Image (cartoon, helix red, strand yellow):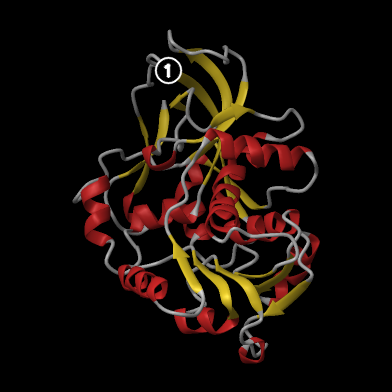
């Protein structure tokens, strides 16, 4: 099978190649999925480049491979068709159209991937394209973890989503609105209409609009891109509110610990997981019309370098899809 192989840590042009790999075989509780589409996410780009928050370079190398990735096939999310099932699989059969996430196991930027049937994999809704299905998990699972689980977002609260036009940002705007919050999206002016169309009540152009006048305005401030700045995020959050950091370095975690001991906004960060129940919940909201995945561009597997370069360019709106089979 063809797969996008990451030869080491570095720029996309330096380390990404298309190569032939051995087709996996499903074992036990595994499905073999013929991958129709995947997504190129911020996580893929950070893993490939090792451009990670301060203090996490060594832990990442220890977890994923010191000089190169132990699993050189990137890709956290997939959609496709079940080609074979392991002997212990229940609830899936050959021919099922599915979507899901492998998380840190990766492996989705290939023509085939083996996934645990008990993991974050579900049947794909019939009205959802393979590309839309493939980009769905990353942003929405991340936004759900931060807004529902960490911030405990409630109806009527005010939310500022900083980086509202990105993969996590577009998901966070929609999810916060589905929870009944009043949503302000901060993005560049050119993306304002997109963010409004997703349900934002107010849109701020962060490049030209002074935000200091909004001090203490929001119950929840969600920095989805790690560019708001710690001091700015705290300043914008109400005294009893929550400041969420999707991108946080070790110094930020020390600040988080300190915040738990004193007064002021609660600060929260951490990695979002991939749980079948969470994905099922999100697909329910999708079926109700409350959510929709946003795709900026789609690339063929052979264009993996261009896909990574665009994904980390800072210009994308929503998600980058990867067409595979």
Q: Position of residue 203 (x, y in %)?
A: 74, 74
Which of the 4 image quarters holds residue 183?
bottom right
Q: Is residue 167 above or below residue 219?
A: above
At x 42%, y 30%, the residue is 2
Camera-side residue: 191 or 230? Answer: 230
Q: Position of residue 307 (x, y in %)?
A: 51, 52
Q: Position of residue 16 (x, y in %)?
A: 36, 48
Instruction: Specify few, some or many for label 1: CA neighbours under 10 Å numbering under 14, 14-19, or 20 or more.
Output: some
At x 25%, y 47%, the residue is 63
On the rendered image, what quadrant is the N terminus found in? top left
Camera-side residue: 36 or 33? Answer: 33
Q: Which residue position holds label 1?
A: 29
Camera-side residue: 53 or 14? Answer: 53
Count of marks, rendered view: 1
At x 78%, y 61%, the residue is 199
Q: Is residue 101 above or below residue 266?
A: above
On the rendered image, what quadrant is the C terminus found in? top right
* SS for dot 1: loop
């Amino acid at each position: 099978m063809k797969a996008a192989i990451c030869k080491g840590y570095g720029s996309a042009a330096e380390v990404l190649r298309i190569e032939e790999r051995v087709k996996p075989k499903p074992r036990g509780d595994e499905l073999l999925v013929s991958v129709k589409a995947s997504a190129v996410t911020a996580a893929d780009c950070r893993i490939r480049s090792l451009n990670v928050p301060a203090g996490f370079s060594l832990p990442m190398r220890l977890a994923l491979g010191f000089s190169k990735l132990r699993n050189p096939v990137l890709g956290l999310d997939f959609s496709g068709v079940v080609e074979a099932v392991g002997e212990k699989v229940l609830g899936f059969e050959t021919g099922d159209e599915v979507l899901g996430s492998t998380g840190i196991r990766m492996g989705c930027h290939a023509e085939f991937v083996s996934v645990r049937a008990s993991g974050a994999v579900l049947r794909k809704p019939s009205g959802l394209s393979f590309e839309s299905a493939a980009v769905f998990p990353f942003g929405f699972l991340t936004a759900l973890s931060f807004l529902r689980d960490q911030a405990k977002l409630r109806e009527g609260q005010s939310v500022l989503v900083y980086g509202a036009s990105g993969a996590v940002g577009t998901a966070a705007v929609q999810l916060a609105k589905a929870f009944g919050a009043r949503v302000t999206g901060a993005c560049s002016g050119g993306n304002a209409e997109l963010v409004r169309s997703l349900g934002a009540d107010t849109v701020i152009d962060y490049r030209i609009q002074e935000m200091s006048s909004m001090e203490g305005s929001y119950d929840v401030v969600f920095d989805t891109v790690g560019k708001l700045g710690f001091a700015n995020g705290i300043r914008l959050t109400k005294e009893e509110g929550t400041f969420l950091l999707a991108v946080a370095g070790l110094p930020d975690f020390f600040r988080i610990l300190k915040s738990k001991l004193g007064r002021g906004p609660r600060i929260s960060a951490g990695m979002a997981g991939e749980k079948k129940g969470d994905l099922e919940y999100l697909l329910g909201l999708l079926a109700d019309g409350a959510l929709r995945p946003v795709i900026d561009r789609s690339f063929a597997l052979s264009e993996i370098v261009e896909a990574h370069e665009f994904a980390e360019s800072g210009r994308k709106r929503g998600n980058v899809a990867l067409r595979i089979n």
